[in-house]
Image: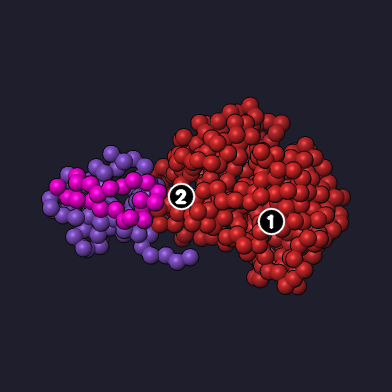
Chain colours: A red, B purple
Amino acid sequence: MAELSVLVATRKGLFVAERSRPGEWSLAPRGFLGEPVSMVLEDPRDGAVYAALNLGHFGVKLHRSADSAATWTEIAAPAYPKRTDEEKKADEAFPKPAPWSVQQIWSLATGGADEPGVLWAGTIPGGLFRSADRGDSWSLVRSLWDREERRKWFGGGYDHAGIHSILVDPRDSRHVTIGISCGGVWETRDGGETWSLCATGMFAAYMPDSERGDPNIQDPHLIARCAEAPDVLWAQHHNGVFRTVDGAASWYEVPAAAPSVFGFAVAAHPKDPEAAWCVPAVKDECRIPVDGRFVASRTRDGGKTFEVLSQGLPEGPAYDLVYRHGLAVDPSGDVLAMGSTTGSLWVSEDGGDTWQSLSAHLPPIYAVRFGAG
Amino acid sequence: MPRVVFTSNLARHLACPPAEVSGATVRVALEAVFAANPRLERYVLDDQGGLRTHVNVFVDGELVRDAEGLSDPVSPGGEIYVLQALAGG
């Protein structure tokens, strides 16, 4: 019986790493072999596991398991409503309008502990969806989709913008913060009825000077929240690491990130607001580890300094790249999981000081997430 | 009645045996199939009801012209083939 598990979503199926006791892990495929699994989620409220597929030819699908990923049932996938003629006309006034069709489920999150059955799904091309019935049905959150600002969003790595981060405030389930590439950071404080931009302080080095500070075009690659100090959030942004200590009202850059400020993933320590982990890489036009040496990094002083973590990671040459959902920390803050596009999977049980390789031969890894076991 | 046949690649995901349904256009014929097999619709059509980008439909060997509206006519003895476009990886 596993006491802790890591769900691993890959380009060719779902894998699960299970820990029977500290230091002892086993790894096995757990469904959808051959199919791209874009996201996975275990709901701690009822133990259900969700897997989002991107079948390519046949579209985006969502499956749910009630038995720890042993067997699966296809459930409804988020889908955009049929566009009216007026909406079609409005879209045609813009050069590259986002299609009203789900291209990928990029993020999945549970609602709060007081909202059983509520799930959130973030998609490419930029729509947020909510389910109140464990994914049996979904609704597009029109209050966000209909915002005029959406017209200025654009894709970062994909053809269209996408929602990759969904953070439900543990103090108030109606307060939800989301991250969009490229559409900044948004929050609702009324369960999704109204939204406001909250990316002030971020800057976009890739934009013309006049647009650099526009919160609506920022490219946070991922946003992570400290569970026990929820006003502290970290963002691995396209051109640096940013942090907020006032619940995203204002962000400031953390320039000490080392050995580089670029990367996709960030994990916030669930208990210590001063601690976070990143997986740095050479910046955007290159996207490889600095000097061909794959490392992670950690700060324990709020971002003033970073330690490079390499013990147990390959000495090099190693060109692993960790995507934005490829790093996760367990609720204790001690155990980390990290998966790369080269198909390497590592765990650390001492907060990143040392790493253990569980495989170097998985399919490209899109996401790792902890489960109960 | 037109006969509708689906690529065997779809059978990996859900049952979709050949079906004989009534319908004078591709849209009407496919809707008849989906009425009996609701999950199948989202595998073939996108959120707006058009043909998925990487799915092709042939009527008696001819690629349909109206991939969005699926208004292409089908004769009573016609055959509709739902196939996947090729992709790598």
Residue A46 image offset from top left, x and y in percent: 59, 31
Look at 57% across and 60% down and name the residue there. A363
Element assignment for label 1:
strand
Q: Amino acid at mark 1?
A: Leu
Look at the image and tell me whether residue A1 can be seen. Answer: yes
Q: Quadrant of residue A119?
A: top right
* Front position in the image: A114 or A75: A75
Q: CA distance from mark 1 to mark 2?
A: 29 Å
Q: Which residues are magenta?
A: B1-21
* Front position in the image: A275 or A145: A275
The chain ID associated with circle 1 is A
Badge number at residue A6 = none
Element assignment for label 2:
strand
Foreground disc of the pair 1, 2: 1
Against B46, residue A113 (above or below) is above
Q: Which residue is mark 1?
A: A358
Queried whether the magenta region covers residue A259, the answer comes back as: no
The chain ID associated with circle 2 is A
- Residue B74 located left or right of residue A19: left
Q: Residues within 10 Å of mark 1 (few under 14, many from 20)?
A: some
Q: Which residue is mark 2?
A: A60
Q: Quadrant of the N terminus of chain A?
A: top right
Look at 52% across and 48% down and name the residue there. A31
Queried whether the magenta region covers residue B11, the answer comes back as: yes
- Residue A101 located left or right of residue A331: left
Residue A346 image offset from top left, x and y in percent: 71, 56
Q: Residues within 10 Å of mark 2 (few under 14, many from 20)?
A: many
